Structure formats: C-alpha cells, structure tokens
Amino acid sequence: MSLNQLLQQAPSTLPILQATFGLERESLRIHKSGKVAQTAHPNVLGSRNFHPYIQTDYSEPQMELITPVASSTKEALRFLGAITDVAGRSLNKDEYLWPLSMPPKITEDEIQIAKLENTFERHYRQHLSDTYGKLLQSMSGIHYNMELGKDLITQLFAESGYDSMVNFRNDLYLKLAQNFLRFRWLLTYLYGASPIAEQGFLEYPLDKPVRSLRNSSSHGYVNHDEVKVSYESLEQYIVDIENCVADKRLIAEKEFYSAVRLRGSKHNRDYLKQGITYLEFRCFDLNPFDNKGITQETLDTVHLFTLALLWIDSVDKIDESISQANNLNEVIATSHPLDTLPEQAPFGTILSSMQEVVNHFQLPDYYQSLIDKVKEQVDKPDLTIGGRLFKEINQLSLEVFGQKQGQAFQAYAWQAPYALKGYETMELSTQMLLFDVIQKGVNFDILDESDQFLKLWHGNHVEYVKNGNMTSKDNYIIPLAMANKVVTKKILDAAGFPVPAGAEFDNKDEALRYFSQIQKKAIVVKPKSTNFGLGISIFKEPTNLEAYEKALDIAFSEDQSLLVEEFIDGTEYRFFILDGKCEAVLLRVAANVVGDGKHSIRELIDIKNANPLRGRNHRSPLEIIDLGDIELLMLEQQGYQPDDILPDGIKVDLRRNSNISTGGDSIDVTNNMDTSYKQLAANMAKAMGAWACGVDLIIPDAKQVSNKENPNATCIELNFNPSMYMHTYCESGPGQAITPKILAKLFPEVHE
C-alpha cells in the first residue's frame, strides 16, 4: 500500500511533533600537548560493561556519550549536556575532549583499539582496523536517533487502511529512510564540519578545504564498493545485508554503514515480525562551536526535515534515486565550504515540504523561523557551520582552533563544578548526586523535578531518592521525628545524651509570660518544626521584653509552635552521619561582614554577596546574605545601623545561628575533629534510628575528649535530609564528598 498523501490528508490536530529522541556523540580524548591521549578509559567512570551513558567507541581514547531516550529534543540535548559535563570533569587534568570530527595530527600507532572485555567487540574492532584502517576510525560524529510518537503512529495507522500495525510501521520507517537518503545532501550542506584532514591522514592530501570529508564517499568512513544494499523493500534490504555477512563482505550486520540505520532489533530479520522501532541518522559532524557538538536549532530543524520526508511522495525507482542523491551528496561534501548548493540540488522540493508541514499542522512560529534560517544559509554559505569553520583554517590545519576550543570547553565544564550543566534549577545536593549517578553509570529518571524526586536503577535493583539523601534506608517515621524538635529532644534525653533545657509554646501569650523565668538568661527562640535555620533568634546575653517578643513573632511566622531554650555557650559544629559513621564535620560561621573603614554594612553585604559561590535556594554552596528582620535586630543589639561605616577589621554578626542556608560561612574541620565527638554524633543518630542525619553539636572546647561521663557537648538539633554540598564545597578546608558515598551505599554492586 502507498503512504503517499497520508500526512496531507491528516487533520491539522494530528500530534505531528510527538516523538522520542536519543543522541550518541563520539569524541577523542586529547592530551594538552595536542596529541591523542594514550591513557586508559578513566577509572572514575566505573565499568564499561554496563555503563549506559559513557562508553568507549572504536579506540581507547574515543569516548561515546549516549543519552537515554528523551521525550523532546530539548530534553535529549539537556541529557547530552550533562553527560558531556560529567565526561569532561572525569578526564585526567591534562586531557580534554576534541571538538572536531577530524582528529588532530595522528598516526596509526597512536590509536589503541579499545581494551574491552567482550571478545567479539575486540575482534570486531580489529576487523575494522584490517578492513578500513585505524585512521578512519578516529573520525567522530553525532548520531541522531528518532522514534515517531506512539499516538502519532496510531492515528496515522487508523487513516492508512493498513491491516497490520507492524507492516505499517515498517513501511512508514522505510519511506523515511528512503527519503532521508534522497535528501541528506541538504544536511551535509548545512551541518558539514570536517573541511580538512591534518597532515598524514589522507593518502592524497587536499589542495583546498571541502565541506565534509566525513560525509564524503571518497574520503569518509563508508563500506567498500562491493557492499550493495537495496532500499526497494524491507525484505530486499534484509536479504542483501545477510548475503554480505554470509560471504564475508561484512563481519556483522552492524558493519553496514549507511547514513541511516533501521533500529530496534539486533537482527534485521526480526523487523519482519516485530517491526522497526526507530531510525538512526548518522551523518552529523561535530559542531565545534558548541560544547555539546550539536545545537537545539539543529535538532529541531532535523526533526522538521524528517517530517517533511514523510510529506514527500515516494518514487518508483528508489535505488536509482538514492544513487543519484549519493552522487549529489558527494558533490556537496567535496565542494568548498563557501560554495552554494549546485543547481541540480532539488532544494525547492524539501523546503516547500517543510513549509507545507508547518502550514498544514499550524506549527508554532519557531518552526517558521527554522525554515527562514535554512533559506538564509542556502543563500549565504558562510553562515553554515562549514562556512564559519572555514574562517578558522590556518594553512590547511585546524589544530590551533581545535586546541583552543577544546580547552575552552573543558574550562567551561569546570565552571561552577558544584553544579550539573542543564540541571542548575534543581537543588544543589541533588545535582551533585546526579553527577555521581551519571559518572558511575546508574540509570536515572527524574520523576518530579520540582520535588527533587529521582528513580535510580541498575539491572533489577531500583531505589527512589528525594532531595539527595532521603531514601528507603530511613523508615517513614524517622524524618517526621527529626522534624519535630520536641520529639528529638525527648528521644535523645531518654538515651542519655545532653540536650538544652527549655519549654514549648503554641501561643504567644504563654510564651510572653515565660519571659520572667528567662529574662536573666541567654536563650534561643526557634520554631518547633523547621529546617535550614529559618525563624531562629539567638540571644547570647539576656535580652529585653521587646526584643524577645519580636523573636517570638519571627518564630511563629515559621510554625504554629516554638521552643524557648537555654543558650549553650561554645562552638557549633555540623556532623554528617551516614549509616552509623561520621563522614564529615563542618564549622559554620554565622553570616557576618568585616569592616574596611570605607563601606557601610549594607555595602559590605553586597560585596560579600557578589562571591560566585553565593546564590539562592541551595543552587550554590553558599547562600546570599539577606538584610531582613533578624539581621536588623542583630545589628541593633550590637549598636549598628545598616548604613553605618564599619571600622577596618571590625566583625559584625548578622545572625546568631550559623546555618549556611542563612548566609553563614563553611569551614571543613573533619580531619581535625577528635574521633570521640564523631562517635558521639554517630551514636546520637543511631539512637534516633537515622541512616542519613545531620547532628548539630555545641562544643565548649573541642580540644577536650568526649566521653560518656563528660560528653563536653550538647546536641541542639538533629536534621533529616541534611545538606551535602556545604561539606564538599567549603569556604575553607579540603571538603568532603558525600554524594558518592550515598550512591555507593545504595548500589554497592556498581562500586565493587
């Protein structure tokens, strides 16, 4: 049956844009000397046997970055950006990813075949070396995988008159593949970016740049001429490839290197019964002007281009048409990057089809802008990637440009290393955990981004994680208990641990009457159930009724109940406890500024907030310092106003509580803290039944040893879901990586 005019007759409400996408990017690891790296695949990336995101392609230094299936091009590119970020930060410090499809100057002796454990994969790569040579294998590109949406295919099937969904899918994808080969020359023109080969790569050096060596049949990575495969029908396609394998023209079906592959099964013959699932487009050079190697605009233009291929009618003599298109593609691939399309290129056919898809399905203006940009690039070749890259060629070499771009992209990967590129809107500890998840090759799905809810799995082992360290390792009641400061105090007190004395209030009148009992004492006023230090007022000296009432109002604004406790003099430390062991100790210094004799307190706060480590909502290791009610109250107690010029060297505290989340500074003291206090904190978490827990201790003198008779410390709070980033990226001290330990506890089989 014919699929011609199927889209033209479909209603405009058809979910035409529905599809899933995946990207596979290849890149060589390069030493800062400019040579291909001779080191092994990075150990920090775990096992290549199962890693879903970062693999080794043909050679040991050739990394392959693979996105999971995404429901949009935007999400696919976001995945690729994150994987690229992780890969870049997992390399040796003197290495970076090469941004070009063509390698730097290289010899066959420098190319080490990937040292994989799988015997067939090693044998397969050796066969490729013997058949095509190692140099061709060092070219890199991006593969664009696309599956039409299930609802889209279902509705088209209902309109098609087909009886079999399998046959319909096969014919639909075969038509797409046929037309892709008929019109891929346009993609070569727009996105070709391999204009030269460095000295020694080609047997016969070029005398001028071209548009895309990699997409050229005369210079690129293609099968030998004796490999002939027909696209007239799926049956003939399968038989031709099977015959090539049978008579040793190919070592395996996957050695057939077409610009488009039918995908979904390991063996082509399975498509006859199970159906083609998706297509793999393999003709994209790396875009060296983007750190990910491809842009959002390119992904969406290709998506629209693919839909136009469905719009275009099939032709009768498909193999003859494809052969003519291959010749045209060769002309375009080997033309100068600033040459326009040749006259015989049927540009009007594909462009008008893209326009008709936009018009018929009333696509957003964005897609019209994509068409307009394609038209502009057709008129002005210097706007294409190849045209832009031509300007960077120096004496038929791109090595200087490649080194500059590659090192700039590597530096970008290390900007804000506490964040995961593309996921910066998520809570910082979750970003850090996701980095480790990608690095170690644990599968993940973001179930609810705003709620920081993740699904992680390896094989049949599934774990759910919220906010970085809330897992099944803690039972439901433990976080609820730690969220309630009264319950926490009672549990710790019953277990014999020191906690501050105090009283609980659920109305302001009773709390005010309590003032007579504490008016001569140093006190802390805090909400009963809160986190991140919100609503806490600390009075190290006895205060007056007016200030006390204001502190009550602040606490009641955060919760319906509050605690008034004795102030424990000493230094506050945060102990991070994981599975019964103290993994980190942090000294947190309350939000403060130090005078310089020139700036006001308000200006000093602005200067300190300009630190790139400071941000909001836990997206940066340090938080912005606010000048709110609590800070103003603190200034008043010290005799200052916000616009006062602070004398040189004078320190003013803006908070009594030292939480990082309220602008405090972080100092890692893990290695200096006596083990007796680490054990004390671990024992407190154990008494609470907590797997992951933050223990806040006030220690008068950390030089003294803590023991059962004299703990020399008071627990002022236990924290469920304690922040992890502040232990890793500190204002001073070495920092302690917590999220890798969380992941290792959840998936010990991955870390064996």
Image: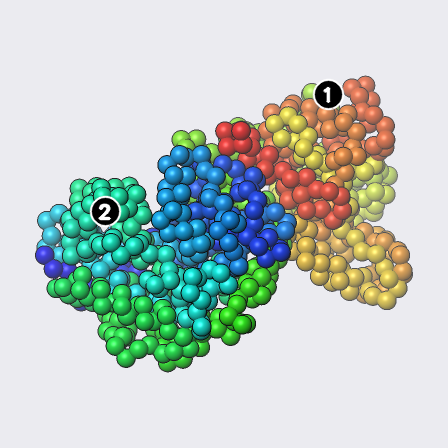
On the question of residue 708 being in view, the answer is yes
Q: In this view, does 287 lie above or below 149?
A: below
Residue 496 is marked as 1
What residue type is disc 2 on? Cys
Q: Whole-percent x and y of residue 484?
A: 62, 34
Mark 2 Cα-neighbour bin, 10 Å: few <14, some 14–19, many ≥20: many
Mark 1 Cα-neighbour bin, 10 Å: few <14, some 14–19, many ≥20: few
Q: In this view, does 101 lie above or below 737?
A: below
* Quadrant placement of the N terminus: bottom left
Residue 581 is marked as none
On the question of residue 354 being in view, the answer is no
Q: Which of marks 1 and 2 is nearer the N terminus?
A: 2
Q: Residue at 73% across / 31% down in the picture?
A: 715
Q: Whole-percent x and y of residue 586?
A: 73, 39
Q: Pick whichever, 635 or 471, lies toward us.
A: 471
Q: Residue at 27% across / 57% down in the picture?
A: 225
Q: Residue at 28% across / 70% down in the picture?
A: 328
Q: Pick whichever, 687 or 321, lies toward us.
A: 321
Q: Whole-percent x and y of residue 610?
A: 71, 61
Which image quadrant for residue 385?
A: bottom left
Q: Count of labels shown?
A: 2
